[in-house]
Image (spheres, rainbow, N blue to C red):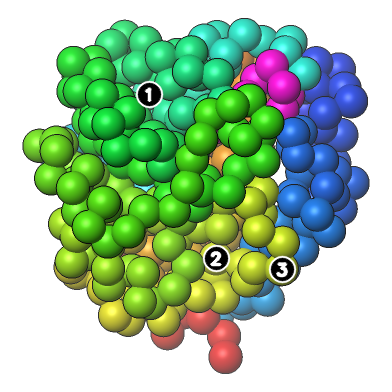
Amino acid sequence: MDMKTVRENARHKLKGFCRVCPVCDGRACAGEVPGMGGLGTASSFKANVEALARVRLQMRTIHPVKEPTLSLALWGTTLAMPILVAPMTGSTYNMGGAMTEEAFVAELAAGALQAGTIAMTGDGADPTMYGSGLAAGKAHPASTIAIIKPRAQEVVVQYLREAEEAGVLATGMDVDGAGLVTMAMKGQPVGPKTFEELQEVIGATKLPFIVKGIMTVDEAEAAVRAGAAAIVVSNHGGRVLDFAPGAAEVLAEIADRVKGRTIIFADGGVRSGADVLKLLALGADAVLVGRPLVVAAFGGGREGVALMLNQFKNELLQAMLLTGTADVSQVSRAILFR
């Protein structure tokens, strides 16, 4: 199996929902929510890709780095790379339904493990979507992370208990899902959380808790004060608010304030291993990949997912060698061209 075959298969299975464009930048699918696109003009989706494209790497080849370290320790487990699968749901209404929700999540989780990393699983307008993620968690104990939508407090606590019973590595909430159109359309109420509400749900579990959807310094600080073990700097793939900045535009300022006090993930517009290195240099500890892995899962199942993740890993290795970066846990901002 190669990526050309994976993309051709995916183009057939995702027809009408994803064009499998040569460059996944949000232009062809603008406004397609539900679907694979960005909300409205897709400005926020495009901003993720464009912001990363503006970041340049300084090439250095006179240095002692010959075998960079790509592994990452995370809550008692060691990943082969600082790249995780982002939480994604909606195989039926966002991706056309050529794969069932359970099969889609299962292939993402299994492919991630095959490549030596893990998947975050999501929640959605159909409650069975969260259940599909928990099923993958049960199949691979301590190797998935269950992310919950900002539902009513009592529902979130119930979902936390289910995650604990499933044996997941960690859990969390994508607070940036507060205004999801698809959730409202399906009668699944979600909304913003107060600081006290966030603190309450974090305190309701002993699992590491991730707050996904942080785009400002003040909210990063609030998440840390509330007890978040990690945050994800993310605008939800540009699917919830038009005209937001890209994650790469706000990451450095957030990292300058909370780095070392919580784990920092970043997602949005990652299309290569070089993009991963850019986000690490801007302050992320690890990176999430979303839409490209939809193509990988539909086009090649778990083997396609592992193939793409390993491609990113190899590109990251090459970028590290050509910037003199020895370890993914110590990426200097000095490798960026200013």
Question: Closer to us: mark 1 or mark 2?
Answer: 2
Q: Residue furthest left?
A: 206
Q: Is residue 92 magenta?
A: yes
Camera-side residue of 295 and 180: 180
Q: Quadrant of residue 299?
A: top right
Q: Is residue 21 visible?
A: yes
| Secondary structure found at label 3 | loop
| Residue plotted at (41% across, 14% down) | 131
Which region shows up in magenta? 88-95
Pick the residue in front: 203 or 25.
203
The answer to whether any part of residue 276 appears in the image is no
Image coords of residue 178 (percent x, y) = 51, 48
Local crowd at mark 3 within 10 Å, few (<14), some, or many (≥20)? Answer: some
Please tell me whether residue 223 is drawn above or below residue 283 in the rendered image.
above
Q: Point out the frontmost of discs 3 and 1.
A: 3
Q: Residue at x 74, y 10 (%)?
A: 98
Tell me the kind of residue under disc 3: Phe
Residue 21: x and y in percent read: 85, 41
Q: Magenta span has 303? A: no
The relative height of residue 300 versus residue 320 in the rendered view (above or below) is above
Report crowding for label 2: few under 14, some 14 to 19, many 20 or more residues within 10 A (C-alpha). Answer: many
**Spatial distance from mark 1 to mark 2, Cα to Cα?**
26 Å
Image position of 82 (left or right of 242): left
Percent of width and height locating residue 209: 23, 44
Label at residue 113: 1
Q: Which residue is mark 2?
A: 247
User: What residue is pinned by disc 3?
Assistant: 243
User: Given the image, on which type of amino acid does mark 2 rest?
Assistant: Ala
